[in-house]
Image (cartoon, coloured by chain):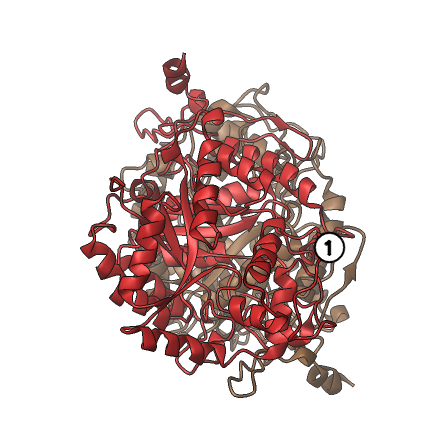
Chain colours: A brown, B red
Amino acid sequence: MARRKDKLKLGAFLLFTGHHVAAWRHPAAGEGTSLGDYVELARLAEAAKFDTIFFADGVAARLSNLEAASRKAHSGVYPFEPITLLSALSAVTTSIGLIATASTSYSDPYNLARQFASLDHLSGGRAGWNLVTSSDPEAAFNFGHEAHIQHGDRYERAEEFADVVLGLWDSWEDDAFPRDKPSGRYFDKDKLHVLNHKGQHFKVRGPLNTPRTPQGHPVVVQAGASGPGKELAARTAEAIFAAQITLDEATAFYADVKGRLGKYGRSEDDLKILPGIFPVVGRTEAEAHDKFEQLQDLIQPEVGLGLVSALAGGFDLSSYPLDGPVPDLPETNAGKSRQALVIDLARREKLTIRQLYLRIAGARGHWQVVGTPEQIADTMEERFENYGADGFNIMAPIMPGGLKDFIELVVPELRRRGLFRQEYEGSTLRDNLGLKRPANRFSRHAAAAAE
Amino acid sequence: MARRKDKLKLGAFLLFTGHHVAAWRHPAAGEGTSLGDYVELARLAEAAKFDTIFFADGVAARLSNLEAASRKAHSGVYPFEPITLLSALSAVTTSIGLIATASTSYSDPYNLARQFASLDHLSGGRAGWNLVTSSDPEAAFNFGHEAHIQHGDRYERAEEFADVVLGLWDSWEDDAFPRDKPSGRYFDKDKLHVLNHKGQHFKVRGPLNTPRTPQGHPVVVQAGASGPGKELAARTAEAIFAAQITLDEATAFYADVKGRLGKYGRSEDDLKILPGIFPVVGRTEAEAHDKFEQLQDLIQPEVGLGLVSALAGGFDLSSYPLDGPVPDLPETNAGKSRQALVIDLARREKLTIRQLYLRIAGARGHWQVVGTPEQIADTMEERFENYGADGFNIMAPIMPGGLKDFIELVVPELRRRGLFRQEYEGSTLRDNLGLKRPANRFSRHAAAAAE
C-alpha cells in the first residue's frame, strides 16, 4: 500500500487522574484537582507538538449507583468545567489546540457560541467545540425536564443547534471592525449580518456580540457513531473522536463517514477521524503488562460492575452472576453506539460479566493496547495507513505518568517513522489539523466567488 | 467624626479601551482586543493590591441606533465573554479577585453555578458573580423570546435563580472528597446533598457536579438599585456596585441597603457597597481638566445623543433640539434606577440635551471626578468616612493609561492616609473583602451549631 502523504494527528484526552477506572488509587497518580496539574499536562503535550488537548464533560453527577460512584473518580463530578479550564490554559500555552465538550441538549446556543468564540479569541485561534447531545439520562433533571430526552429528539435539536451556532459565528465579517480613530468608525455596518433564525427548537435573532474569530470559527468536533450522529458529523463536524476497537470496525467507520461528505459538498480532507486509544507503554512487553496489572488490581468489584451497567445503557447487571455470561439486554435510550460496542465485545470474546468489566474497565470501552513503543507505533501506523484513522486521541491510563510515557517512548518512534510532525505547521488549530479556514457565508466576497 | 477602622476596597472595572465613550479614538488608548492587554491590566491592578478586577457584560449587541453604535466601542460587542476571560486571567494572577457579570434572565442556573464554581477552583478562591437581570430590551430576542421580559418578572426569576445557584453550590460538603487510596473511598456519600428544587421558574434536581469551592461559594455581587434590586441584594449579595452620584444620594443608598440586612439575619459587614467612580487624574488641576477635554473633544454627536437615549430608558431624543431642554420622558421597562439618575441630573443642573450628553458621556451616568490626586483622595475619603461607600470600583477613563494614573498617583495618597492596604490580607477574595466564608447549609455540623 502506498504510504500516506499526510502525517497523523495527536490529541491528549485529559481526564484528571487518568483513564483507567482505578488510576486514582495508584500511588503515582496525581489528584488532578488543581489548575497547576493541568498546566503541567498541557505543557507536556505542547512540548511534544500534540495537536490538541481535549476534555470530556457531562452536566450531571452519575450517582444512580451511589456505592459504585463513591468508589471512583469517574462519576461525572469534575474538578473543573471544561470551557473555563481551557480558557485558563489558553493563557499559559501558545500553540496547542483546546477542545472542550459542551452539550446541545442542555446549553443555550447564543451563550455557547459566544463562549467558544471567546476561547478562540483568547487563544489566538486554538479553540474547538466537541458537540455532544448528552446521553446521560440524569442530566435532564438538572435542566427542568421531567424525563430524559429521547435519542432522536436530541439529534433533531442538535442539528438545529449547530446551524444556529455556525450562523452566529458569521455575524460579523472578518474585517468588520476597522476601529479607525480619525474617521470615528469603530465597525462597518455593511459587514454586520443578523441571523434571524426561527426554527423548531430555537428563535435567535443575533448578531453574536463578539467579532468573528481568528479561525473563522472554532473547529467543530463530534463523537456520536449512531446513524443520526454520523450524518450530523458529515454535515457539520471537522473532527470526530471515534471509538471503534478493531481495525475492521475502524476502517468501516472511516469509509462510512468519509463517504457521506460528498453530498454536503465537502471533501475527505475536511473531516479528520481520530479514534481514542488507551496505550499502556513499557520498555519491554513484560513491563507494559506489569503496569497494566498494577492498575487492574486496584479495580473494586462494585466499580467494575457499575461501569459495565453504565456502558450497557444504564441496564443493571447486579442481579446476574458475576461469573456468568452477559445476558441479552433491551435497547435503551442512552447512547446507542456505546451500548453496541460493549455488547459486541462480550459476544465476540464470550466473556463473563467479571471478565467483561476487567476487559473494559481500563479504557471504558475504548481501544486498548498494551505493549512496547514499537508495538504501539505498529498498531497506530497500521490503522493510519489503512485509513482507519487520521490520527489518535491519546487516553493515558494514568496522569501524568501515562502521558509522559507515551511522549517519551512512543512519540519518538512515530517521528522516526515519519508519521508525526517535528514542529507545528502553524499557529491555529486549523493550521495544525490541516483544516481550511471557513469563509463567512454572508460576505459579499464569498457570495460573489460562489456564483 | 470617628475615623472608620476598616480600610476601603478597590476594584478595577476593566472595559477594553476605557470608560470614556470616546476613549477608543484617543492616540494612547489600547484596542483591548487581545488577552495580553488584559493580562497587563490585571497585573497592574494586582501589583497595586486591588481587591478585584471586574467585567460588565450583556448578551446582545446594542444596535437599535446603528449609526451611533458603529461609531463607538461600547455597543455591547465585547472582545471576550467575561467568564472565559477571567478564567484565562486566573492562570496568570495569584491574589486579585475576579468578578464576572452574568445574567439570570438569559442563563441556565446549573451551567452558571458550575462555571462560577469552576472559576473559584481555578483561581484558588478568587471568583465573584455579578448577578444582573439584563435590562437591555434587545437581549430577549437572542433567547427565544418574542418581547423583552418585564422588570418585575426579571426580578422574580432572579430571586429564584439565586436560590437555585446558592443551593447547588452547597451540593457537597467541604470535606466530601477524601480520595482515600487504601480504602478506595473517593467521596463520602453522607456529605452529598441533592437540592431537588421545584419552583415557579426552575426545576433543578442537583447535585452540582463540582466539589464545593475554596470560598465555600463565589462572592455574589449585584448592581440593581430599584426596590426589588435592593431587596434581592440585601438577601443574597455580598457586594454592590453602586451608581449614586452625590454624597447625599450615596449615604442614603448605603443606609437604605444596610438597613435591610437585619431582617435576613445578616450584619452590615456581610455586604460591601462599592460605588463606581470615573476619576480623571492630573498632577495639577489644569492637567486633569486638559486630559478630560482631550477625551471630550473626541465625542461624536451621534454617539453622545445615542448614549443619552440609551441611558434614558431607550427613549429616542433625536427629534428634540440638541440645545433645548431635556423633555419629560415616559417610564419604560428598562433599568429604572439608571433612567432616574440621568433625568435627575438633567433637572438638577438645568442641562440642554447637548450639555447632558457631554456631562454623562464620560462616565456614562456614573460619578465623575476630575482633579489632582489629593482632590480625588479627598472625595473618596469623604464618601468612605461618611458611610457612603465601603470602597470604590475604579472606572478608568482610558486604558491602560487611566488605570496607571490612578495607581501611580492616587493609590499612594490613599495609603499615606491609611485608607488602603499595603498587602493583601489573605489569599481569597473573601479574605480581602472582609467577608465570612459561608457554612454549608446542609452540613450536619452547621445544622447542629444553629440549634
Residue A113 picture location, percent across and down: 61, 59
Q: Which residue is mark 1?
A: B330
Dot 1 crowding, Cα within 10 Å, few <14, some 14–19, many 20+: few
Residue A369 picture location, percent across and down: 44, 50
Would you identify the image quadrant in which residue A443 lies? bottom right
The foreground one among B282 and B252 is: B252
The foreground one among B184 and B302 is: B302
Quadrant into which the C terminus of chain A falls: bottom right
Left or right: B59 in relation to A99: right
Residue B80 picture location, percent across and down: 50, 63
Q: Is residue A215 above or below residue B389?
A: below
Left or right: A363 in relation to B438: right
Query: Which residue corresponds to the image point at 57% horizontal and 40% vertical from the top-left?
Result: B110
Residue A448 picture location, percent across and down: 74, 86
Would you identify the image quadrant in which residue A270 lies? bottom right
Q: Residue type at mark 1?
A: Pro
- Whether residue A278 is visible here, answered yes or no, is no
Instruction: State the SS at label 1.
Output: loop
Would you identify the image quadrant in which residue A415 lies? bottom left
- Whether residue A392 is visible here, answered yes or no, is yes
Query: Which residue corresponds to the image point at 23% horizontal and 60% vertical from the top-left?
Result: B413
